[in-house]
Structures are given as structure tokens and as C-alpha cells.
Image (tube, rainbow, N blue to C red):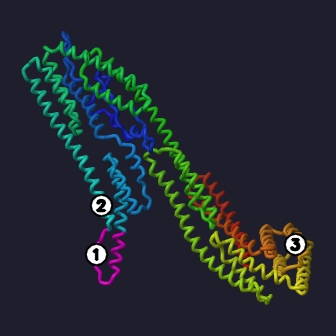
Amino acid sequence: MEDNVNKLPEGQEDPKDGVQQNTELVENDATEQTDSAVTTDTEETTQPEVDTTESAEEPVKDEVVEESVAEAESKAADTDSSEDQEDSNEEESEEEDEDTKLLESLHFENPTKEELMEALKKVSHMTNMRALDKALKEIKPPYESIQEKEKNVALESFLAEEGNEETDFVFKSEKIDDEFNDLFELLRSKKQKFFADLERAKEENLARKNEILEKLRELVDGEESTASINSLKELQQEFRKIGPVPGPQVKTMWANYNAILDRFYDNRSIYFELKELDRKKNLESKLELCEKAEQLEKVENIKEAIIQLNELHEEFKHIGPIPKDDQEPVWQRFKAASDKVYTKRKEFFDQLKSELSENAEKKMALGDKVQEFLSFNSDRITEWNKKTKDLLELQKQWEAIGGLPRDKAKEINKHFWSGFKQFFNNKSNFFKTLEGQREENLKKKQELLAKAEELKESSEWDRAAKELKALQNQWREIGPVPEKFRNVVYEQFKAACDQFFDRKRAQGDAKNAEFVENLKKKEEICSMLEAYLNSDTIELEEVYNLLDRYSDIGFVPRNAIKSSHARFDEVTDKLLNLEDLSESQRSELQTQVQISKLKNSPHSSQKINRKEMAIRRKISSLEGDIATLNRNMDFFANSKTADKLRADVENQIASTEKEIRELKKQLKLLNQI
């Protein structure tokens, strides 16, 4: 934002040419936000100095100073500049903190009409008309866009009915549309009336000041009297009380005002002594203002110090002329005191600008972290809850950082909050989908449980065992159920299966003989596997077949379970450590061994189910990593360093994809059980 007060109007002389100076404070966005600590647009503010001339000086006795027309015009232009700033400052009213906060909060991401209506109601209480104008421009377009979409949908629906023509279509707005439009028009009228009244007041002020200028001309051109100086003072006082005038008229008005005063004092030498006394009184007043300005350096509140300095400059400008010998020293003293305040303000805003820039970097980094959450996906509630906790921790860090530069606030806020909202949308969708799937899975498992309950008392051992194993396989394929039913339904199903197989194992000597035969078969398979340890070549397919046969054999006598498992573990460990195996062969063999052990272990169905879920979670996590790596590659620039980074990321992606393929092979084998 350009600081207007640092520019001199056209034709204004440099202060080095002996023209008096005055420093006017300009209210800018940075000053407005000093105490509110909200997001602000911090710009480097230089000391706004504007040259102005004292009211026309009366010649001192025995020393008449004649001024040229050019000098008089210069003084008029200088005075005009100060008044121009005054009018401009009064037009640019200081925004209130609450209005500014509310304005900066208007960032919409796919808003609804209800949200926009609520926002319009909030801004309706704004007292700052410029802030209200910006707010209306922020709210109206998205609402009209929503209305247009609704109208198009209604038109398409209308035309879809047979016999309807577009010319017959009449769109009926909703109640909220009428309420929105009524409130919007009310606020717009309020804003327009405010600015119209402001311009009308300026025009009235101009007319009143021109009337006073005409009276001043009549006074200057009239006959000399003892009351002339009092009349002049009264007109001057009345002139000062009148408010601002339209900007284009400021320069001409002040030029005329100062020219008339110059003529008054130049033409009435009889009042020289009175004028000199008046100058001395003015000198005392200006010295008092200098002392007050010097005390402002000690004021801690920069905003308050600037407001007071503004008032001192206003008084300084209107006090009137002082003895010429004192003009420059007094002005330099007053200017030096003002410069110290402005220097203090500049240092404050430089520091504030630095802090806001640091805040912008920190909040942008938090926004980048939030974007990483958008690729998260899982089928576990605990993992979603953990991610939610992590995201809320980022929100706390965001809120603790502080304000932002106004020119970056909207972009950075959108970067963070859009990702924040999208994560919770994803989470909501996950729970909606998950709940439906798990309810369906629960119904399926309850059906399997009912069948298992029917079979648990059966004495048809082979048929019932086969059917129960089939039910167990179906159970594993179904997937998770709601958390509150998971353990209950599983324990009931497991109890039904265990009851049957416990009864089955309790069948006398005949069944024990079968277990002994199973032990013998397993020992034979272990011996066949051991033969491969000393063989020159190893046929993995045959090994896999032996492992499948081993897992399909069945139970062994209770007293031989540990020894049988120990021998099988020893043989398979040696097979896995054969040097002739490649890494892929070793990985595949290890998977087959693990599956075989799972099938022969107690609670095998539960363990296989857990193994399957663990592999699925691992695949989902790796796929998320690949998606993140692919997005990161889009940010690499075209350079040697970027190419190297890209190559590293591509290698990492390839390695991850290979790991996924291996996991999918394991998953496929588990599904075949």
C-alpha cells in the first residue's frame, strides 16, 4: 500500500527553500492493527512529512518583507498539502478491531446458503462502511453462484417434463433467498447512504468555507477599523471548525485563504505592533506544543502516541504565525520531536512485519503437514483416532502462532483449513462405509454361528468336521464386524467349533490310532524335507506340496505335539537358510512355512485372520507412501539436483511396489487356505 502522505502535491516547494513544515499522521492498516493482534497487512511505513506554511506573516516594524507572487503560491500549495492530508485522513476512518477480525474470517470453501446467510447477518452489525463493502463483495458472489446452480437444476427438471417450454419456466426462490436479498439490499443502501452523506457534507462544507472566504475578502477590501482584527479572528475560528471538503477543491481553497490573509496583514501596517504581539503569543503556544511533542517519546503505546501527535500537528498548523527569526528553530524542534515518535513507530512496525513473516512461514509449514493427512487411509478405527489426535495437535500449534500478513492471510488460511476440513470429511465417509460393511458382516457371521451351533452336537464326525471347517473358512473371508460385537460373536463361534472337535478327539482308541498315524505321516514328511538339505538341487514346488500335505494331515497325539512341532520348525529353518535360494524364493518359502504353521497351530482361524488383516494394513500403508512420493515428485524443479532427487524417489517407489507385490502374494496364499 502506497503511503500518500510521503508524496508532495504538484508545485509544492521543498522545505529547504525556507517554507515551514508540518508533519501529518496518516492512518494506515498497520496502525489500525497495533493493539488488536489480528492478521494485518504490515507495510514499511516511513515518516510522513508534509510541508506547510504558517498563516501569512505580518511584516515587522521598520522591516517590511515583500514576498513575490511565486512565493505566495508556494505557501498556498504547502498549506493545501497539509489540509489535503487532514481531509484524506478523515475520509479514511480507522477500522475497528472487531470489524477487521470478522472481515478476515470470511473465507468460504463450498459454502451453503445457510452459512452465507449467517455470515451476512454477522457483518450487518459492522460500523465500518469500508469493511462492510468488502464483506458484501465477499459474500454475494458465492450466494449468486449457488442460486444460479439451483435455477439451472430446476430448469432442467422443468424441461424434462413433456410439453414444457423454457419460456414458460418461472423459478421460485426459497424463503432464505428473499431474506438474503432483503438484508443485502438493506446493507447496500446503508453503505450507499453513508458515502452519499459524506460527499454531501463535504459539498456543504465547501459552500460554507467559500462563504467565509467571501466575507474575508470583503473585510480585507473594506475600510480599516479597530474591529477588523477581531472580525478576522472570528472568521478564522469559524473557518477552522468546518469539516473536510472535496479533495479536488482543497488546494484552491487553501491558496485563496492564505492569499487573503497575506493581503490583510500586508495592507494594514497600523496593526503591525498588534500582530507582533500576536506572534509572540503564538510562539509561546508553539513552544508549549513542542514540549508536549517531546514528551510523546516516553509513551509506550505507539498508537496512542501517534493520535496525540496528530492532534498536536493540527493545533500547530492553526495557531498562526510567529516571529520570523523563531520560525525555523521552532519548527525544527517540533519536527525533531515528531521524528523520534515516527522512528519509534517505524521500528515497531519493522519488528511486527518480521514477526508476521515468521508466522506466515510457520503456518504455511503446518498447512503442508495437514495436506499429508489427506492421503491417509485405514480400515482401523484406532488408526483414524490417532491421526485425528495428531491433526488436532497441529491445530493447537496453529492457534498459538499468532497473526499473518494481510496479503497472505487468505491463501495460508485456505491452505490449512481446506486440508483440515477434507480430512474430517474423509474420516466421516470412512465411518459411514465401515459401519454399513460391518453390520452386514455381523449378519453373515451370525448366520455361520447358527449353523455351527447346529453341528456342535453332531455324531457324524467326518461330515460335521468338513462342514465346520468350511464355515471357518467362510468366517475368515467375511471380514470385521462392529467392535462391540467382535469378541462376543467370535467366542461363541469358536466355542461351538471347539465343542465339536473336543468331542471328536475324545473318541476312543480308534481316533488315537488316527492321531498316531498322523504323527507318522508328519515325521515322514519331515524326513523328506530333510533330504533336500543334502541334495544338490531343490524343487520348491515339491517342497510346497509337502508343506501343504503336512498342514492337511491333522492332529497328532497330545504328548507328541511339541516334539512334532520342534522337528518341523528345525527342518524348515534349515531350508530357509540354504544358500542356493534367491531372496524371492526364500521369501516365498518363508510365507509357505508360516501358513503351514498357522494352519497347524491352536486357534488357527483367528491367527490367520489376524495375519491377513496385518498384511492388508501394510499394503494400504505402502500404497499411501507411494501416493505421497508421487505428489512430492511434482514439486521437483528441472535441475541436476532435482533429477537426482527424482531418481532416488523413483527407486524408493519401485522398492515399495516390489514389497507390495510380495505382500499380495502372501495374501493370495492366505485366501487359498
Q: Is residue 509 above or below residue 562?
A: below
User: Judging from the image, what secondary structure is the residue with disc 1 in?
Assistant: loop
* Residue 208 lies in quadrant: top left
Residue 511 in sight in this render: yes
Q: Nearer the viewer, mark 1 or mark 3?
A: 3
Pointer 1 or 2: first along the chain: 1
Residue 321 relative to residue 661: left or right: left
* Residue 505 lies in quadrant: bottom right
Residue 161 magenta-highlighted: yes
* Circle number at residue 565: 3
Spatial CA distance of label 1 from label 3 is: 81 Å
Residue 563 on image: x %, y % = 91, 72
Q: Which residue is mark 2?
A: 181
Which three-letter amino acid code belongs to the residue tagged 1? Phe
As rendered, which of 149 and 112 lies closer to the eye?
A: 112
* Circle number at residue 169: 1
Label 2 Cα neighbours within 10 Å, binned few <14 / some 14-19 / many ≥20: few
Spatial CA distance of label 1 from label 2 is: 21 Å
Residue projecting furthest to the left: 223
Which three-letter amino acid code belongs to the residue tagged 3? His
User: Judging from the image, what secondary structure is the residue with disc 2 in?
Assistant: helix
